[in-house]
């Protein structure tokens, strides 16, 4: 052994001696992810930057959005920090997945998954169109189809099929069909559909799109229900509620949709061979937080951290000066979206029901280890 080799060996030994954590890290095997990739379809509840590239008012590419994110910079997420799929990606052992429009299009950039979600999107193509451009549900599925074709060309059809069928697909969409369509009475929809019939239209339209994904070899899906939008600061301001009371007629529509969508998901799981689909009732999880806010450490339950007007619900969050100093005390970040802390709680419930059960017939953790409860 020459002197140069000996010197390098000694230096390495000293480094490891002074930094035992490095030695431990070298000895620990890398834990493989619990799923090969995470793909996201949805609206502003899970948009990670799609709308940054679109001509729309529905954008979160400015502070104070993102101020509590890992980078402390706006990313396009409609939150002060992380969104639910960020927390779930970490649980799965995956990095945060990039937005479809925010990556280069190389397979290497998409190998851990892609986020197609677009703020303003709904199950109905016209929902949210008054805000400007968005990527509709049908268009998002077409984008995934294009991604799938790239995987086939890169790794071969059999490998691409296995990759997709073992990946997790997270679907969170539907709230804009109320906010930006039904409650605005677009196209005189209120006189054509009663709330229950409108819910049926949405649920069976989403059912068709889930079957389209199945036909593209998607097998593991998490379908999210609707949040208690009647408790959002926007509607408490608009309806002039007192003492932070929720607008129950609006909440009733969320409850009805979730009831119907849970039934649809159960039937799809029976109908589609090898399909593993779970439904997560965001209304249940959110109401548990609202009703037990003291247990969760929230001091402010009805007013948004960032906004203007009563409940901070009249006008959207536009500048850092409009925001509270500590969002972790708040349930709502802006007119419609929860804080990073709430997103973390909901994600924990989706993963394993840590705080309250809201997913049926199993949790995401059960799905990835193939052990349904």
Image: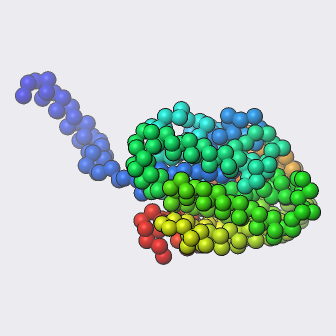
Percent x, y for residue 343? 62, 57
Residue 93 visible at all: no
Q: Residue at x 68, y 34 (%)?
A: 53
Percent x, y for residue 207? 66, 63
Write down the quadrant of residue 311 in the picture.
Answer: bottom right
Q: Residue at x 42, y 65 (%)?
A: 369
Q: How many marks?
A: 0
Q: Residue at x 40, y 42 (%)?
A: 155
**Coloration of the structure image:** rainbow
Write down the quadrant of residue 242 in the picture.
Answer: bottom right
**Residue found at the very far left of the displayed protein:** 1
User: Is residue 21 found left or right of 124 in the rendered image?
Assistant: left
Task: In the rendered view, tell whether residue 44 sits above or below residue 195.
Answer: above
Residue 367 visible at all: yes
Pick the quarter of the image with the N terminus: top left
User: Is residue 29 found left or right of 368 in the rendered image?
Assistant: left
Task: In the rendered view, tell whether residue 333 sits above or below residue 205.
Answer: above
Percent x, y for residue 198? 81, 64
Percent x, y for residue 372? 47, 73
Q: Residue at x 10, y 24 (%)?
A: 3
Most foreground residue, 364 or 197 = 197
Most foreground residue, 330 or 317 = 317
User: Is residue 70 found left or right of 51 in the rendered image?
Assistant: left
């Amino acid at each position: 052994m020459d002197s140069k080799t000996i010197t390098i060996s000694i230096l390495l030994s000293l480094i490891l001696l002074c930094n035992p954590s490095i030695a431990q890290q070298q000895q620990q095997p890398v834990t493989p992810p619990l799923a090969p990739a995470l793909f996201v379809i949805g609206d502003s509840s899970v948009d990670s930057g799609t709308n940054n590239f679109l001509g729309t008012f529905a954008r979160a590419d400015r502070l104070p959005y993102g101020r509590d994110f890992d980078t402390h910079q706006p990313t396009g997420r409609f939150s002060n920090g992380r969104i639910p799929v960020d927390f779930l990606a970490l649980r799965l052992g995956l990095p945060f997945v990039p937005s479809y429009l925010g990556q280069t299009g190389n397979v290497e950039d998409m190998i851990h998954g892609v986020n197609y979600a677009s703020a303003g999107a709904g199950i109905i193509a016209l929902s949210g169109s008054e805000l400007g451009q968005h990527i509709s549900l049908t268009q998002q599925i077409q984008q995934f189809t294009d991604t799938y074709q790239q995987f086939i060309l890169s790794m071969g059809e059999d490998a691409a099929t296995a990759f997709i069928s073992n990946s997790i697909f997270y679907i969170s969409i539907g709230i804009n069909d109320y906010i930006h369509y039904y409650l605005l009475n677009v196209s005189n929809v209120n006189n054509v559909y009663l709330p229950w019939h409108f819910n049926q239209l949405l649920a069976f339209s989403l059912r068709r799109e889930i079957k389209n994904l199945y036909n593209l070899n998607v097998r593991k899906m998490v379908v999210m229900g609707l949040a208690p939008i009647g408790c959002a600061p926007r509607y408490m301001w608009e309806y002039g509620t007192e003492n932070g009371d929720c607008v129950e007629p609006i909440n009733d529509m969320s409850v009805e949709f979730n009831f119907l969508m849970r039934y649809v998901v159960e039937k799809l799981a029976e109908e589609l061979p090898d399909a593993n689909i779970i439904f997560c009732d965001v209304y249940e999880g959110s109401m548990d937080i609202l009703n037990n806010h003291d247990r969760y450490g929230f001091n402010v339950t009805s007013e948004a951290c960032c906004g203007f007007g009563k409940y901070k619900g009249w006008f959207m969050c536009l500048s850092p000066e409009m925001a509270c100093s500590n969002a972790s005390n708040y349930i709502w970040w802006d007119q419609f979206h929860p804080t990073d802390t709430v997103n973390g709680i909901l994600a924990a419930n989706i993963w394993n029901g840590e705080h309250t059960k809201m997913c049926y017939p199993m949790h995401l953790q059960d799905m990835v280890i193939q052990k349904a409860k």
